[in-house]
Image (cartoon, rainbow, N blue to C red):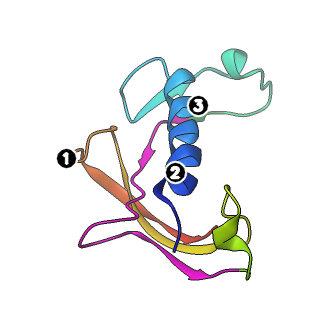
Amino acid sequence: KFSLSSILIPALLLLLLLTLTSSSDAFSRPVSRAEAGLAQQSSLTHLNFYFHDYVQGPNPTAVRIAQAKDTDSNPGNFGALVMIDDPITEGPGNNSKMVGRAQGMY
């Protein structure tokens, strides 16, 4: 058993970081070589996307698959291994256009 806060807090921090570094709601925008500080690169694209990590409900996208024996007794759920299959969308809303999936473990 893992707590919602152990997944929600890191996800919210990542979302906040992505939001603070984004100046628009566009999925992508061109970035000049000078703006990126790259002299030799011919083009660069800045991507903004959103992971939707659902840990509860009828269709969770993040499921704990292993844990250490002390995982449930520590506040950060250290030792938990979670497998994900998260939708990635253009915007932060649940109904935003899906552009891919994030699959893996954390």
Q: Residue at x 34, y 70 (%)?
A: 60
Residue in the image at 46% along x and 57% along y: 4
Q: Which tag, 3 or 1, sits closer to the chain's start?
A: 3
Q: Which residue is mark 2?
A: 5
Between 78 and 98, the one lying in front of the other is 78
Marks 2 and 3, how far apart at CA: 18 Å
In the rendered structure, does residue 95 fall within the stretch colored magenta? no
Q: Hey, which residue is sitting farthest left in the picture?
A: 95
| Separation of marks 3 and 1 at Cα, in angstroms | 21 Å
For badge 3, the amino acid type reads Leu
Q: Secondary structure at mark 2?
A: helix
Which quarter of the image is occupied by the C terminus?
A: bottom right
Circle on res. 95 = 1
Horizontally, is 82 left or right of 57 in the view? right
Q: Sort mark 3 into few (<14), some (14-19) or many (20+) by Cα contacts within 10 Å.
A: few
| Earlier sequence position, callout 2 versus callout 1 | 2
Name the mark nearer the viewer: 2 or 3. Answer: 2
Cα separation between marks 2 and 1: 23 Å
Residue tagged 3: 17
**Which segment did they paint magenta?**
46-67
